[in-house]
Amino acid sequence: MLWNNELTRLLKVQYPIVQAPMLGVTSPEMVAAVSNAGGLGSLPVGGLSPEKTRELIHKVKQLTHKPFAVNLFAHSIPEYNIQEAEAMRALLKQLKQEHGLATEIPELDSLKFYTYEEQIPILIDESVPVVSFTFGIPDDASLQQLKQHGTILIGTATCVDEAIVLEQKGVHAITLQGIEAGGHRGSFLHDALPQIGLMALVPMAAKVVKIPLIASGAINSGATVKAAFTLGAVGVQIGTAFIASTESLAIPAYKEALATAQDTDTALTQVFSGRWARGIHNAFMEQLENSGSTLPPYPVLNSLTGALRAEAQKQNNGTFTNLWAGQAASMYVRQKNSAEILMDIIKNTEQ
Ligand SMILES: Cc1cc2nc3c(=O)[nH]c(=O)nc-3n(C[C@H](O)[C@H](O)[C@H](O)COP(=O)(O)O)c2cc1C
C-alpha cells in the first residue's frame, strides 16, 4: 500500500491517518506520540478556556515538532429555558445523593461558556498547522484569518449536504463521520439527526465533493482502512481504538467496558450534554432517559452534568459518566502506547 497521497502532502505527514480528537480522553502525550510516529495527532480543545487552550498547545509543542491538529467546537451559545434547567439541576442533585457522588451541581448563573471565537487568536498566535472543527463551521472572518495565516482547515460532515457546504466555505479537507462513530455527532445542518453509515456516506460524498475526504467511524484495522480508501476516502480518522492506550485519560472502568462491549452495547444519547453522542449504554443514560425530563441544550446540560461525571470518574465509576465509544468498540482494545496502536494498524493494512 502506498501511503503518499494528496492528504499526506496537504498535512505534511507520512501516513494519511488522523488520531481523532477526543475531549476527555486525548492527552498532549497521545497527540505527540501519533504525530511523532508519522500520523496526525489531534488535540481537542472544544469549549475550553483560552488559557487552557494555550497551555495544552504548549505541552504538545514540547513533545513534538511534527504537524498536529487542534480541534474546535464551532457552535453558537443558545438561549435556554431557566425553569427547565433548574428542574434538571434538581434531578441531578437527587441522583448524586442516591449514588453517593459527593459533588455540587453548579448554579445556573455560575456557568461560563467559552466560544471558539475566543480560541482563534491563540491558534493563530501559536501557528497551529492544522485546525479541525465539528458541530458547525466557524464564521467567515475566522476562516479567512486562519487561511491567511496558512492554517490547513478540516471540517466535519455527517451527510452529503454538510460536506458540500464545507467545500463551498473553502476548507481544505473534510472528515466524514459515519453513524458508527463514537463520541459527539458533528451534525450541523438538519434538525433531524442524519444517521448515515460510513459505507453509504463516503462514496456519496466522493461523487460530489472534490477536496480530500477522511473517513471516520469503526476504523481500527487494515481491512477497515482499505475499505475506506476503496470507497473514495484518502485518509481515515480513528478514535475508539486509541481510548485504551497508555497515553489516554480514560479511567480503568471505561477501558474495561470497551474490552467487553458487544456490537449492540453502544447507543446514541443526548442526556450527558444536550447534543447527540454515541457511547456505551450505562445507568446514567437509562435513568435520565426514563426520567421524562426536558433536556437543556448543549452546552448548558454538558456543564450541569460535568461535576457529577468528574466525581464518578474520580471514583472509577463507569455507570455515571459518559463512556463514548464507536459501534466497533471491542474490535481493537489494546493497552499499548498510541504509536504502537498506529503502527499495528499501518502494518495490518500493508499485509
Ligand atoms: C471519546 C471520544 C471523544 C470524542 N471527542 C471528539 C472531539 O472532541 N472532537 C471531534 O471532532 N470529535 C470527537 N469525537 C469523534 C471522533 O472525531 C470520531 O468521529 C470517532 O471517534 C470515529 O469513530 P470511532 O470512535 O469508531 O473510531 C470523539 C470520539 C470519542 C470516541
Image: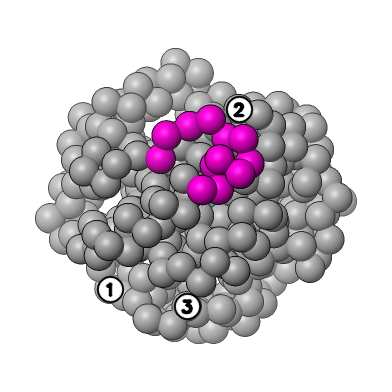
Nearest to the eye among marks 1 and 2: give it.
Answer: 2
Of residues 77 and 96, the one nearer the viewer is 96
Residue drawn at 38 percent across, 75 percent down: 162
Spatial separation of the CA atoms under disc 3 and disc 1:
22 Å
Which disc number belongs to residue 193? Answer: 3
Q: Residue furthest left?
A: 141
Residue matched to label 2: 314
Q: Quadrant of residue 234?
A: bottom right
Q: Quadrant of residue 177?
A: bottom right
**Element type at mark 1:** helix
Q: Is residue 246 above or below residue 147?
A: above
Residue drawn at 37 percent across, 81 percent down: 191
**Element type at mark 2:** helix
Q: Is residue 292 left or right of residue 260?
A: left
Region rendered in magenta: 94-105
Q: Horizontal and vertical percent for residue 263? A: 80, 65
The three-letter code of the residue at mark 2 reads: Lys
Q: Quadrant of the N terminus?
A: bottom right
Quick one: label 1, few (<14), some, or many (20+) residues within 10 Å?
A: few
